[in-house]
Image (tube, helix red, strand yellow):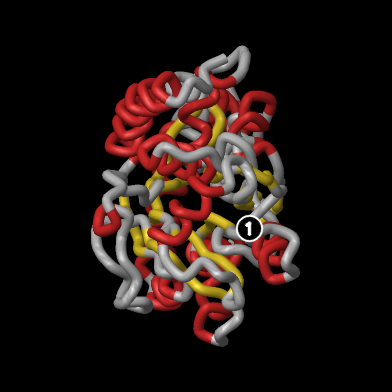
Amino acid sequence: MTHALLNRRTLSLLLAAGCVAGPALAQPERFPSRPIKVLIGFTAGGSTDVPFRVLAENASKILGQPVIIENKPGAGGVLPAQMMQSTPADGYTLAQVPLPVFRLPYTQKINWNPATDLQYVIGLAGYAFGLVVPADSPIKSMQDYIAYAKDNPGKLNYGTPGALTTLHLTMENIALQAGVTLNHIPYKGNSESLQAVLGGHVMSIADTPGWAPYVEQGKLRVLSVWGDKRSARFPNVPTLKEVGINLVQTSPFGLVVPKGTDPKIAQVLHDAFKKAMEMPNYKESLAKFDMDTYYMDSATYKQYALDTMKTEKVIIEKLGLAK
């Protein structure tokens, strides 16, 4: 047997045993190897969109690939979560999940379940909320607001970023506690409802603090904030509890991927977005809207989803809005 033949046989045996990597044994694709999309359910320029663009820029530096924000407004912010049901589970598309997603099974017929058909990656932040009126409105306080509603049943209108959003349901809960009837005007997102109140098309809006600069400029007046304590930016404005409405609303949100995504890929995304949300510029962008980070790891976020679905069911039934 020649030396060359022996070498060929030895190489064949080594290849068969897996000791030498042949060209057919390609390395697994490194994640991510192409741009990542983040779908958010609200319009550009609002209190969701602005901080998310900062977060995406931070995450792109960590992941080494562009992270692109895509706005999918309408339906109270739930469209991105719905889109996850037909999106490839490869980690290249994430969705923001706001609180209205967790009440979907009780308000409309859907063929998927937020508890089991989304893969929870990370909890990011929580909204601040408030009720505002034009600066020239005769309504100067929450007491005035309730009094006007009592004197003019169904005539006092308010705008929100959409039907069955947290803002809509909280306003209806306020009306229920106060014994008044309000007229809800739904818009497609925060920026639309804000322009409506600034333009005098609606008497009030319930929204995240995209209204804050206009309050400071003297164009709008804030009647109440909805956290458990007063806003540092508007320390003279009472909470709902302080005006006799027994409610606190902060509405945490985060990111999910489609069910069935490789847990290792989900972990890469979690770690990258956790670093991104810890950067000072993200916290600064949230602060412009009176928002704070609200970190939850994947397991905690999943449990939060399960718990929230139970509480939302109770609220929906109490308000008589169940399907």
Residue 303, quarter of picture: top left
Query: With respect to residue 201, does 91 lie above or below?
Result: above
Query: With respect to residue 54, does 313 lie above or below?
Result: above
Query: Farthest bottom residue?
Result: 217
Give the secondary structure at mark 1.
Answer: helix
The percent coordinates of residue 143 (x first, y second) are: 38, 59
Mark 1: few, some, or many residues within 10 Å (few <14, many ≥20)? many
Please state, as top left, top right, bottom left or bottom right, where the C terminus lies in the image.
top right
Which residue is at a point 28% across and 37% down the rendered structure image? 300
Left or right relative to 314: residue 208: right
Which residue is at a point 52% across and 32% down the rendered structure image? 101
Left or right relative to 171: residue 73: right
> What residue type is disc 1 on?
Asn
Which residue is at a point 45% across and 26% down the rendered structure image? 319
Query: With respect to residue 35, does 5 lie above or below?
Result: above
Residue 57, quarter of picture: bottom right
Query: With respect to residue 176, does 1 lie above or below?
Result: above
Viewer can see residue 263? yes
Which residue is at a point 35% across and 31% down the rendered structure image? 308
From the viewer's side, name the closer residue of 314 and 127: 314
